[in-house]
Image (tube, rainbow, N blue to C red):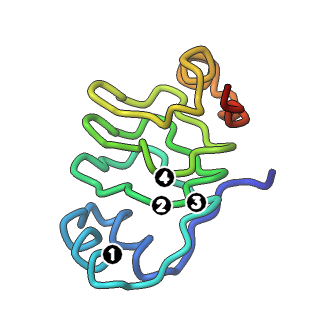
Amino acid sequence: MSQPEIKQDFMYQLLREGKIEAFNQSKNDGESFDLRGCDLRGLDLRGLDADGIDFSGCYFRQADLRGIDFSKANLEGASINGAKISGCYFPKNIPADELALSLTHGTRIRVSAPQAGP
């Protein structure tokens, strides 16, 4: 995995500027964006509509993620070291110990393979 990027993408810049409502509206209006591998360290992202977003490889170090529903987002390879995660809802394919390791040690999140049916 490469280092996190600070991209010039319009949607990414909205997040960096703290314009969460504008990001959500643009996302709902169909604006395209690519947040894979982005540097989101230290940002206040509360209120973000994370539904369907690919955050693979992103750095969320010390970010304020409180209350975000990541259940339908891709967090593979992301790091949440020191982030505020109270009230977050994470995907079912990420074990709690993976989240704990990433939160306390900065490891990149590994996702579990889907379970086969009976």
Identify the image quadrant of the C terminus: top right
Q: Is disc 3 in contact with disc 4, using a CB cutoff of under 8 Å? A: yes
Amino acid on which the number 3 mark rests in the picture:
Cys
Q: Is disc 4 in contact with disc 2, using a CB cutoff of under 8 Å? A: no
Q: Quadrant of residue 105?
A: top right
- Give me the C-alpha separation between circle 3 and circle 4: 6 Å
Q: Is disc 2 in contact with disc 1, using a CB cutoff of under 8 Å? A: yes
Near mark 3 (Cα within 10 A), the count class, few <14, some 14-19 or many ≥20, is: many
Point out the tag, 3 or 2, that comes first from the N-terminus. Answer: 3
The residue indicated by pointer 2 is: 53
**Kind of element beneath mark 1:** helix
- Give me the C-alpha separation between circle 2 and circle 1: 10 Å
Near mark 1 (Cα within 10 A), the count class, few <14, some 14-19 or many ≥20, is: some
* Residue in the image at 35% along x and 64% along y: 15
The residue indicated by pointer 3 is: 38
Amino acid on which the number 2 mark rests in the picture:
Ile
* Residue in the image at 58% along x and 60% along y: 38
- Give me the C-alpha separation between circle 1 and circle 4: 17 Å
**Kind of element beneath mark 4:** loop
Amino acid on which the number 4 mark rests in the picture:
Leu
Q: Quadrant of residue 67?
A: top left
Q: Is disc 3 in contact with disc 2, using a CB cutoff of under 8 Å? A: no
Point out the tag, 1 or 4, that comes first from the N-terminus. Answer: 1
The residue indicated by pointer 1 is: 27
Point out the tag, 4 or 2, that comes first from the N-terminus. Answer: 4
- Give me the C-alpha separation between circle 3 and circle 2: 12 Å
- Give me the C-alpha separation between circle 3 and circle 1: 17 Å
Amino acid on which the number 1 mark rests in the picture:
Lys
Front residue of 46 and 74: 74
**Kind of element beneath mark 2:** loop
The residue indicated by pointer 4 is: 40
* Percent position of residue 39, x then y: 55, 55
